[in-house]
Image: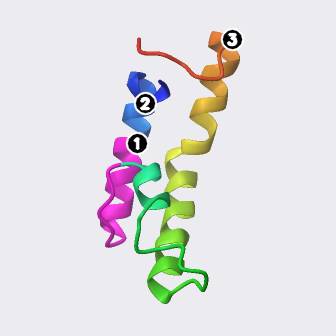
Amino acid sequence: MAEADSRVRAVFTGWSRCMSAAGFDYRDPMAANNDPTFGTGVPTAEEIATATADVACRTEENVNGVRPDLARYTGSARPQGD
């Protein structure tokens, strides 16, 4: 599982810090994505604010670049631990 890779863990830690600075408490991007208070059909102001911070933090921490890079260099879509 990619989350076991130290590079992914480091990026997720940075992402979590970034989200915390924006006022949100999530351990990783999947926790924000899967927040049960969201997904009710019509986005709430809180959901939009969370999504906006998520995108900014993903960009700042290069979350969306780490997994594809690892997959390319390891030859696996699901990088394993170090």
**Rendered location of residue 79, percent (x, y):** 54, 19
Give the magenta-colored segment's residue range.
12-27
Residue behind mark 2:
3
Task: Name the front one of labels 1 and 2.
Answer: 2
The residue at 34%/43% (across/down) is 13
Evaluate if marks 3 and 2 touch, with contact meaning CB atoms under 8 Å apart: no
Circle 1 sits in a helix, a strand or a loop, which is it? helix
Evaluate if marks 1 and 3 touch, with contact meaning CB atoms under 8 Å apart: no
Q: 41 or 59, which lies in front?
A: 41
User: Looking at the picture, which amino acid does disc 3 mark?
Assistant: Gly
Circle 2 sits in a helix, a strand or a loop, which is it? helix
Circle 1 Cα neighbour tier, 10 Å, few/some/many (<14 / 14–19 / ≥20)? many
Question: In the rendered view, does 75 fall on the left or right side of 66?
Answer: right
Residue behind mark 3:
75
Evaluate if marks 1 and 2 touch, with contact meaning CB atoms under 8 Å apart: yes
Q: 77 or 36, which lies in front?
A: 36
What's the image's color scheme? rainbow
User: Looking at the picture, which amino acid does disc 2 mark?
Assistant: Glu
Q: 43 or 8, which lies in front?
A: 43
**Rendered location of residue 81, percent (x, y):** 41, 15
Q: Does the magenta stretch include residue 13?
A: yes
Q: With respect to residue 13, does 16 lie above or below?
A: below
Q: Earlier in the sequence, mark 1 or mark 3?
A: 1
**Rendered location of residue 59, percent (x, y):** 58, 53
- Residue 19: image quadrant is bottom left
Residue behind mark 1:
12
Q: Is residue 16 magenta?
A: yes
In space, the residues marked 3 and 2 are separated at their CA atoms by 16 Å
The residue at 37%/46% (across/down) is 14
In space, the residues marked 1 and 2 are separated at their CA atoms by 9 Å
Q: 30 or 51, which lies in front?
A: 30
